[in-house]
Image (cartoon, rainbow, N blue to C red):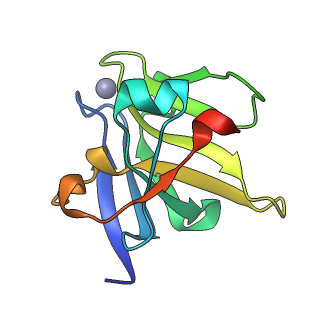
Amino acid sequence: MAVSRYHGSCHCGAVSFDVETDLDKTATCNCSRCQRLGIVLAFAAREVFTLNSGEGNLTEYLFNKKTIEHQFCKTCGIESFAYSSSPEGVPMVAINVNCLEGVNPRALTSHAFDGASV
Ligand SMILES: [Zn+2]
């Protein structure tokens, strides 16, 4: 599959973005938040992520170590992505694969990250 370009959005469409990411490298996570969301994550450098609309419609949620800036739509409540950094300090985005157009997240083989133990 390798790196491809995808379009993503929240439920109401206020927030939309384009991103280049590799869906062979997705992850699920069992931390208290990801488990509640049922999120499937894909990762990309911030420089290949373009927020097309919705900048002013985003609300941020921080928890635990507060290093991941969860962004969700004020109108529909869907978190379509989060801002974070790699361990080396490179600005990253974590994408909610469930919000990508034309992608079936349940058909992907995702790495199970044990976020509950972090
Ligand atoms: Zn929305």
**Count of numbered labels shown in the rendering:** 0
Relative placement, left or right, of 19 versus 69 is left
Name the residue nearer the viewer: 53 or 39: 39
Residue farthest to the top, as pictured? 75
Residue 10, above or below 109:
above
Q: Position of residue 28 (x, y in %)?
A: 43, 48
Left or right: residue 107 compared with residue 113: left
Q: Is residue 81 shown above or below 19? A: above
Q: For ligand 1, which image quadrant applies?
A: top left
Q: Is residue 90 left or right of residue 29?
A: right
Residue found at the far right of this picture: 88
The quarter of the picture where residue 74 lies is top left
Question: Where the N terminus falls, by quadrant?
Answer: bottom left
Q: Is residue 59 above or below residue 105?
A: above
Which part of the image, by quadrant, shows the C terminus?
top right
Residue at 60 percent of width and 34 percent of height? 116
Q: Position of residue 27 (x, y in %)?
A: 45, 56
Q: Nearer the viewer, residue 102 or 40?
A: 40
- Does 40 sit above or below residue 116? below
**View extreme (front): residue:** 117
- Measured as percent of width and height from the top left, residue 89 is found at 83, 58
Q: Which residue is found at the position 37% from the left and 36% from the top?
A: 15
Question: What's the residue at 30%, 42% (across, down)?
Answer: 9
In the rendered image, which quarter is residue 35 located in? Answer: top left
Instruction: State the image coordinates of residue 108 (x, y, percent, origin top left).
Output: 26, 64
